[in-house]
Image (cartoon, rainbow, N blue to C red):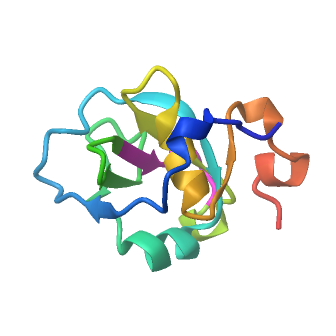
Amino acid sequence: MKFNPPDTWRVSKPVITKLPSTTKEHYMTVNRGYVITDYDSLVKTFGPPSIRGSSDNKVRVKWVLKADDGTIITIYDYKENVPITQMRWFNVGGFSRDKHELDILQRLGFNIAEDYYDMPLGVKYHEV
């Protein structure tokens, strides 16, 4: 299922800034959906992850991003056991109730899924 944001959001391609690992702006973001892409594409677009590893070992990589409208977006793996380079989707986190984070990633050219069950089976199970 394709995420259909309100037309008022579709203004222009957003400008994204990667925040440093020391920022606390990403604390307590909530899962808003999924970006269907691979690790190399994320690195090509946003550079290396902002954070590698978490204290509870549930996250191995996390990008902490801020859009030009102030929206905080986190992209991360969560409790996955496949090698990072074989991942075919990543969690998207944020604070907005209307899932604005997904619209921003969609405007950057990424495929997104609002729900885990919206993903194609091959992608869902990280199959090539």
Q: Position of residue 51 (x, y in %)?
A: 28, 56
Of residues 108 and 81, which is closer to you in this image?
108
Q: Does 17 sit above or below residue 91?
A: below
Residue drawn at point x = 62 percent, y = 64 percent: 109
Left of 71 or right of it: where is 42? right
Q: Position of residue 104 (x, y in %)?
A: 50, 50
Left of 51 or right of it: where is 87? right
Is residue 21 something that shows in the picture? yes
Q: Is residue 75 magenta?
A: yes
Residue drawn at point x = 37 percent, y = 53 percent: 62
Q: Position of residue 127 (x, y in %)?
A: 82, 60
Residue lying furthest right: 121
Residue drawn at point x = 71 percent, y = 30 percent: 115
Residue lying furthest top: 97
Number of marks in the rendered image:
0
Q: Is residue 62 magenta?
A: no
Of residues 88 and 57, which is closer to you in this image?
88
Residue drawn at point x = 25 percent, y = 39 percent: 26
Q: Position of residue 30 (x, y in %)?
A: 42, 26
Q: Does 16 sit above or below residue 43?
A: above
Q: Which residues are magenta?
A: 73-82
